[in-house]
Image (cartoon, rainbow, N blue to C red):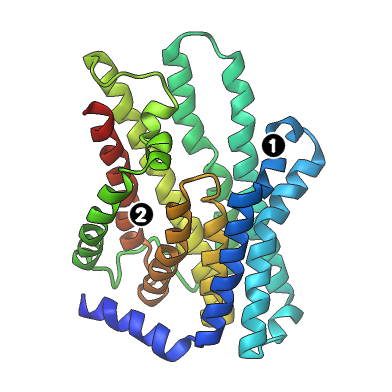
Protein backbone atom coordinates (compact mmCIF):
# COMPACT_ATOMS: atom_id res chain seq x y z
CA UNK A 1 0.00 0.00 0.00
CA UNK A 2 2.95 2.33 0.67
CA UNK A 3 4.04 1.99 -2.94
CA UNK A 4 0.54 2.85 -4.15
CA UNK A 5 0.51 5.96 -1.97
CA UNK A 6 3.94 6.95 -3.26
CA UNK A 7 2.70 6.65 -6.86
CA UNK A 8 -0.21 8.98 -6.07
CA UNK A 9 2.00 11.48 -4.22
CA UNK A 10 4.51 11.57 -7.07
CA UNK A 11 1.81 12.50 -9.54
CA UNK A 12 -0.17 14.99 -7.46
CA UNK A 13 2.86 16.75 -5.94
CA UNK A 14 5.45 16.48 -8.71
CA UNK A 15 3.85 15.91 -12.12
CA UNK A 16 0.59 17.82 -11.69
CA UNK A 17 0.13 21.59 -11.82
CA UNK A 18 -2.68 22.62 -9.43
CA UNK A 19 -4.18 25.19 -11.83
CA UNK A 20 -4.31 22.56 -14.55
CA UNK A 21 -6.23 20.21 -12.27
CA UNK A 22 -8.62 22.99 -11.23
CA UNK A 23 -9.25 23.94 -14.86
CA UNK A 24 -9.95 20.35 -15.84
CA UNK A 25 -12.31 19.94 -12.87
CA UNK A 26 -14.09 23.19 -13.76
CA UNK A 27 -14.48 22.05 -17.36
CA UNK A 28 -15.74 18.54 -16.64
CA UNK A 29 -17.89 19.83 -13.77
CA UNK A 30 -19.57 22.29 -16.14
CA UNK A 31 -20.05 19.54 -18.70
CA UNK A 32 -21.65 17.28 -16.10
CA UNK A 33 -23.93 20.10 -14.93
CA UNK A 34 -25.03 20.84 -18.50
CA UNK A 35 -25.75 17.17 -19.12
CA UNK A 36 -27.79 16.61 -15.96
CA UNK A 37 -29.57 19.97 -16.04
CA UNK A 38 -30.36 20.28 -19.75
CA UNK A 39 -29.96 16.67 -20.88
CA UNK A 40 -27.65 17.49 -23.78
CA UNK A 41 -27.19 13.89 -24.88
CA UNK A 42 -30.94 13.25 -24.85
CA UNK A 43 -30.94 14.58 -28.40
CA UNK A 44 -28.77 11.62 -29.40
CA UNK A 45 -31.66 9.18 -29.38
CA UNK A 46 -32.74 5.91 -30.90
CA UNK A 47 -34.92 7.53 -33.55
CA UNK A 48 -31.81 8.70 -35.42
CA UNK A 49 -29.70 5.58 -35.12
CA UNK A 50 -29.95 4.72 -38.84
CA UNK A 51 -28.75 8.16 -39.93
CA UNK A 52 -25.07 9.00 -40.49
CA UNK A 53 -25.64 12.09 -38.36
CA UNK A 54 -26.20 9.84 -35.35
CA UNK A 55 -22.74 8.30 -35.61
CA UNK A 56 -21.19 11.75 -36.05
CA UNK A 57 -23.07 13.05 -33.00
CA UNK A 58 -21.90 10.16 -30.83
CA UNK A 59 -18.29 10.55 -31.98
CA UNK A 60 -18.39 14.27 -31.17
CA UNK A 61 -19.94 13.50 -27.79
CA UNK A 62 -16.75 11.63 -26.86
CA UNK A 63 -14.28 13.62 -28.96
CA UNK A 64 -15.23 17.03 -27.52
CA UNK A 65 -14.31 16.48 -23.84
CA UNK A 66 -11.36 14.26 -24.75
CA UNK A 67 -9.75 16.74 -27.15
CA UNK A 68 -10.61 19.82 -25.08
CA UNK A 69 -8.94 18.26 -22.03
CA UNK A 70 -5.84 17.75 -24.16
CA UNK A 71 -6.07 21.41 -25.20
CA UNK A 72 -6.17 22.50 -21.55
CA UNK A 73 -3.12 20.32 -20.91
CA UNK A 74 -1.24 21.97 -23.80
CA UNK A 75 -2.04 25.43 -22.42
CA UNK A 76 -0.73 24.78 -18.91
CA UNK A 77 2.30 22.73 -19.93
CA UNK A 78 3.08 24.76 -23.06
CA UNK A 79 3.12 21.55 -25.06
CA UNK A 80 1.69 22.47 -28.45
CA UNK A 81 3.87 20.19 -30.50
CA UNK A 82 1.53 17.24 -29.89
CA UNK A 83 -1.05 18.95 -32.13
CA UNK A 84 1.47 18.78 -34.98
CA UNK A 85 1.86 15.04 -34.49
CA UNK A 86 -0.15 12.95 -36.96
CA UNK A 87 -0.12 9.98 -34.57
CA UNK A 88 -1.77 12.11 -31.90
CA UNK A 89 -4.60 13.15 -34.23
CA UNK A 90 -5.05 9.59 -35.39
CA UNK A 91 -5.25 8.27 -31.82
CA UNK A 92 -7.79 10.76 -30.47
CA UNK A 93 -10.05 10.29 -33.51
CA UNK A 94 -9.52 6.52 -33.48
CA UNK A 95 -10.35 6.27 -29.76
CA UNK A 96 -13.50 8.39 -30.08
CA UNK A 97 -14.68 6.43 -33.11
CA UNK A 98 -14.02 2.99 -31.63
CA UNK A 99 -15.98 3.70 -28.46
CA UNK A 100 -18.73 5.38 -30.47
CA UNK A 101 -19.17 2.18 -32.46
CA UNK A 102 -19.63 0.27 -29.22
CA UNK A 103 -22.22 2.82 -28.09
CA UNK A 104 -24.00 2.68 -31.43
CA UNK A 105 -24.29 -1.10 -31.16
CA UNK A 106 -25.62 -0.79 -27.61
CA UNK A 107 -28.52 1.33 -28.86
CA UNK A 108 -29.02 -0.75 -31.99
CA UNK A 109 -29.71 -3.86 -29.89
CA UNK A 110 -32.82 -2.24 -28.41
CA UNK A 111 -34.64 -2.61 -31.73
CA UNK A 112 -33.56 -6.23 -31.99
CA UNK A 113 -35.07 -6.87 -28.55
CA UNK A 114 -38.45 -5.82 -29.92
CA UNK A 115 -38.51 -8.53 -32.60
CA UNK A 116 -37.32 -11.38 -30.40
CA UNK A 117 -39.81 -14.10 -29.45
CA UNK A 118 -41.93 -13.39 -26.42
CA UNK A 119 -40.10 -16.07 -24.46
CA UNK A 120 -38.12 -14.55 -21.63
CA UNK A 121 -35.29 -17.05 -22.04
CA UNK A 122 -34.55 -15.90 -25.59
CA UNK A 123 -34.62 -12.27 -24.50
CA UNK A 124 -32.37 -12.97 -21.54
CA UNK A 125 -29.77 -14.91 -23.54
CA UNK A 126 -29.63 -12.31 -26.26
CA UNK A 127 -29.17 -9.55 -23.72
CA UNK A 128 -26.28 -11.36 -22.05
CA UNK A 129 -24.53 -12.10 -25.34
CA UNK A 130 -25.06 -8.54 -26.56
CA UNK A 131 -23.19 -7.19 -23.53
CA UNK A 132 -20.05 -9.03 -24.61
CA UNK A 133 -20.59 -8.79 -28.38
CA UNK A 134 -20.41 -4.99 -28.38
CA UNK A 135 -17.04 -5.16 -26.61
CA UNK A 136 -15.61 -7.05 -29.57
CA UNK A 137 -15.73 -3.73 -31.42
CA UNK A 138 -13.34 -2.33 -28.82
CA UNK A 139 -11.03 -5.32 -28.59
CA UNK A 140 -10.50 -6.00 -32.28
CA UNK A 141 -9.52 -2.51 -33.57
CA UNK A 142 -7.41 -1.78 -30.48
CA UNK A 143 -5.68 -5.16 -30.82
CA UNK A 144 -4.91 -4.44 -34.48
CA UNK A 145 -3.41 -1.06 -33.53
CA UNK A 146 -1.33 -2.64 -30.77
CA UNK A 147 -0.11 -5.39 -33.10
CA UNK A 148 1.31 -2.93 -35.59
CA UNK A 149 2.31 -0.05 -33.29
CA UNK A 150 3.18 -1.31 -29.79
CA UNK A 151 3.54 -5.09 -29.88
CA UNK A 152 7.33 -4.93 -29.67
CA UNK A 153 7.41 -2.47 -26.78
CA UNK A 154 4.69 -3.60 -24.35
CA UNK A 155 2.16 -6.34 -23.55
CA UNK A 156 -1.38 -5.84 -24.81
CA UNK A 157 -2.19 -2.57 -23.00
CA UNK A 158 -2.09 -3.64 -19.38
CA UNK A 159 -2.66 -7.38 -19.73
CA UNK A 160 0.28 -8.30 -17.54
CA UNK A 161 0.82 -9.23 -13.89
CA UNK A 162 4.33 -7.79 -13.75
CA UNK A 163 4.63 -5.19 -10.94
CA UNK A 164 1.14 -6.19 -9.76
CA UNK A 165 0.17 -6.79 -6.13
CA UNK A 166 -3.40 -7.71 -5.20
CA UNK A 167 -3.45 -6.56 -1.56
CA UNK A 168 -3.51 -2.74 -2.08
CA UNK A 169 -6.44 -3.02 -4.47
CA UNK A 170 -8.41 -5.14 -2.02
CA UNK A 171 -7.80 -2.45 0.60
CA UNK A 172 -9.09 0.18 -1.83
CA UNK A 173 -12.16 -1.96 -2.44
CA UNK A 174 -12.76 -2.27 1.30
CA UNK A 175 -12.55 1.52 1.63
CA UNK A 176 -15.22 1.87 -1.05
CA UNK A 177 -17.62 -0.55 0.64
CA UNK A 178 -19.23 1.92 3.10
CA UNK A 179 -19.59 4.50 0.31
CA UNK A 180 -21.43 1.96 -1.84
CA UNK A 181 -23.69 1.06 1.08
CA UNK A 182 -24.45 4.75 1.65
CA UNK A 183 -25.20 5.27 -2.05
CA UNK A 184 -27.53 2.28 -2.07
CA UNK A 185 -30.04 4.22 0.05
CA UNK A 186 -30.49 6.84 -2.68
CA UNK A 187 -33.59 6.63 -4.87
CA UNK A 188 -31.71 7.32 -8.11
CA UNK A 189 -29.34 4.47 -7.26
CA UNK A 190 -32.17 2.01 -6.65
CA UNK A 191 -33.86 3.05 -9.89
CA UNK A 192 -30.76 1.92 -11.80
CA UNK A 193 -29.59 -1.11 -9.84
CA UNK A 194 -29.45 -4.04 -9.75
CA UNK A 195 -29.22 -4.29 -13.53
CA UNK A 196 -30.37 -7.90 -13.36
CA UNK A 197 -33.79 -6.65 -12.24
CA UNK A 198 -34.01 -3.39 -14.18
CA UNK A 199 -33.39 -5.20 -17.48
CA UNK A 200 -35.41 -8.34 -16.85
CA UNK A 201 -38.74 -8.96 -15.05
CA UNK A 202 -37.07 -11.32 -12.59
CA UNK A 203 -38.11 -12.18 -9.07
CA UNK A 204 -35.36 -13.22 -6.70
CA UNK A 205 -37.99 -14.94 -4.57
CA UNK A 206 -38.49 -17.48 -7.35
CA UNK A 207 -35.71 -20.05 -7.02
CA UNK A 208 -35.69 -20.92 -10.72
CA UNK A 209 -35.11 -17.27 -11.64
CA UNK A 210 -32.15 -16.67 -9.36
CA UNK A 211 -29.84 -18.42 -11.80
CA UNK A 212 -30.73 -15.85 -14.46
CA UNK A 213 -29.67 -13.06 -12.14
CA UNK A 214 -26.25 -14.58 -11.46
CA UNK A 215 -25.68 -15.54 -15.10
CA UNK A 216 -26.35 -11.95 -16.12
CA UNK A 217 -23.99 -10.69 -13.40
CA UNK A 218 -21.23 -12.83 -14.91
CA UNK A 219 -21.66 -11.22 -18.33
CA UNK A 220 -22.08 -7.81 -16.71
CA UNK A 221 -18.70 -8.32 -15.05
CA UNK A 222 -16.99 -9.22 -18.33
CA UNK A 223 -18.07 -5.86 -19.72
CA UNK A 224 -16.13 -4.06 -16.99
CA UNK A 225 -12.94 -5.92 -17.90
CA UNK A 226 -13.07 -4.50 -21.41
CA UNK A 227 -13.99 -1.03 -20.17
CA UNK A 228 -10.87 -1.12 -18.02
CA UNK A 229 -8.85 -2.37 -20.98
CA UNK A 230 -9.98 0.55 -23.14
CA UNK A 231 -9.65 3.38 -20.61
CA UNK A 232 -6.80 2.39 -18.29
CA UNK A 233 -5.13 0.21 -20.91
CA UNK A 234 -5.30 1.68 -24.40
CA UNK A 235 -6.14 5.33 -23.59
CA UNK A 236 -3.26 5.51 -21.13
CA UNK A 237 -0.51 3.11 -22.10
CA UNK A 238 -0.68 3.78 -25.85
CA UNK A 239 -0.76 7.54 -25.27
CA UNK A 240 1.73 7.61 -22.38
CA UNK A 241 4.47 6.02 -24.47
CA UNK A 242 4.19 8.90 -26.92
CA UNK A 243 2.98 11.88 -24.88
CA UNK A 244 3.71 11.21 -21.21
CA UNK A 245 1.53 12.14 -18.22
CA UNK A 246 -0.60 14.48 -20.29
CA UNK A 247 -2.80 11.50 -21.20
CA UNK A 248 -4.17 10.98 -17.68
CA UNK A 249 -6.81 13.67 -17.15
CA UNK A 250 -8.10 13.62 -20.76
CA UNK A 251 -8.75 9.91 -20.22
CA UNK A 252 -10.62 10.71 -16.99
CA UNK A 253 -12.79 13.28 -18.82
CA UNK A 254 -13.59 10.77 -21.56
CA UNK A 255 -14.40 8.21 -18.87
CA UNK A 256 -16.89 10.56 -17.20
CA UNK A 257 -18.98 10.83 -20.38
CA UNK A 258 -19.79 7.10 -20.43
CA UNK A 259 -21.46 7.54 -17.03
CA UNK A 260 -24.00 10.09 -18.26
CA UNK A 261 -27.48 8.82 -17.46
CA UNK A 262 -26.30 7.08 -14.31
CA UNK A 263 -26.78 8.52 -10.79
CA UNK A 264 -25.06 11.91 -10.48
CA UNK A 265 -22.81 10.80 -7.62
CA UNK A 266 -21.55 7.89 -9.69
CA UNK A 267 -20.75 10.18 -12.61
CA UNK A 268 -18.84 12.67 -10.45
CA UNK A 269 -16.89 9.96 -8.64
CA UNK A 270 -15.91 8.37 -11.96
CA UNK A 271 -13.53 11.28 -12.59
CA UNK A 272 -11.64 10.75 -9.36
CA UNK A 273 -11.76 6.97 -9.51
CA UNK A 274 -10.63 6.96 -13.13
CA UNK A 275 -7.75 9.29 -12.30
CA UNK A 276 -6.50 7.21 -9.37
CA UNK A 277 -6.73 3.92 -11.25
CA UNK A 278 -5.06 5.62 -14.20
CA UNK A 279 -2.05 6.67 -12.15
CA UNK A 280 -1.63 3.11 -10.92
CA UNK A 281 -2.03 1.66 -14.42
CA UNK A 282 0.69 3.93 -15.80
CA UNK A 283 3.11 3.25 -12.96
CA UNK A 284 2.59 -0.53 -12.90
CA UNK A 285 1.87 -1.07 -16.59
CA UNK A 286 -0.98 -3.36 -15.54
CA UNK A 287 -4.77 -3.04 -15.51
CA UNK A 288 -5.23 -6.08 -13.24
CA UNK A 289 -5.68 -3.96 -10.12
CA UNK A 290 -8.10 -1.66 -11.89
CA UNK A 291 -10.16 -4.65 -12.97
CA UNK A 292 -10.38 -5.86 -9.37
CA UNK A 293 -11.48 -2.45 -8.06
CA UNK A 294 -13.82 -1.60 -10.93
CA UNK A 295 -15.44 -5.00 -11.11
CA UNK A 296 -15.59 -5.27 -7.33
CA UNK A 297 -17.39 -1.93 -7.00
CA UNK A 298 -19.80 -2.85 -9.80
CA UNK A 299 -20.77 -6.11 -8.13
CA UNK A 300 -20.97 -4.46 -4.70
CA UNK A 301 -23.41 -1.94 -6.16
CA UNK A 302 -25.47 -4.74 -7.68
CA UNK A 303 -25.72 -6.74 -4.48
CA UNK A 304 -26.24 -3.70 -2.25
CA UNK A 305 -29.23 -2.80 -4.40
CA UNK A 306 -30.37 -6.42 -4.38
CA UNK A 307 -30.48 -6.43 -0.58
CA UNK A 308 -32.73 -3.37 -0.64
CA UNK A 309 -35.06 -5.08 -3.12
CA UNK A 310 -35.29 -8.15 -0.90
CA UNK A 311 -35.96 -6.27 2.33
The residue carrying pointer 2 sits among few (fewer than 14), some (14 to 19) or many (20 or more) residues within 10 Å by Cα, namely: many
Compared across the picture, whether 172 is left or right of 110 comes to left
**Left or right: residue 204 compared with residue 113:** left
Judged left or right of residue 152, residue 68 is right
Residue at the image position 35 percent from the left and 79 percent from the top: 8
- Depth check: 238 or 185 in front? 185
The residue carrying mark 1 is 45
Assign the C terminus to one quadrant of the image.
top left
Q: Residue at x 74, y 74 (%)?
A: 86
Percent coordinates x, y for residue 247 in the rendering? 55, 74
Q: Which quadrant holds residue 88?
A: bottom right
Please identify the residue farthest to the top as the structure is shown.
118
For label 2, the residue is 294
Residue 45 shows in this picture: yes
Q: Nearer the viewer, residue 123 or 276?
A: 276
- Upstream in the sequence, badge 1 or badge 2? 1
x 34%, y 84%: residue: 9
Residue at 80 percent across and 36 percent down: it is 51
Crowding at dot 1, Cα within 10 Å, few <14 / some 14-19 / many 20+, comes out as few
Residue 177 location (% of width, % of height): 23, 54
Residue 150 visible to the viewer: no
Which image quadrant for residue 148? bottom right
Q: Mark 1 or mark 2: which is in front?
A: 1
Amino acid sequence: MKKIISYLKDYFFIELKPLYLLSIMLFIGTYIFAEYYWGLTDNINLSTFTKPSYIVAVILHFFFPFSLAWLIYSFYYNDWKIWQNNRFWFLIIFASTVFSLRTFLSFFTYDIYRILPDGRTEYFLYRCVAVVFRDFFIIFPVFVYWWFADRKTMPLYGFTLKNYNTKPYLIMLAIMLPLVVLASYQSDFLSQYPKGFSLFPLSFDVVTERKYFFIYEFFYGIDFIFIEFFFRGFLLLAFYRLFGWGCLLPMACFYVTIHFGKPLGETISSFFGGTILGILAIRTGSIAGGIIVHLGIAWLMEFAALLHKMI
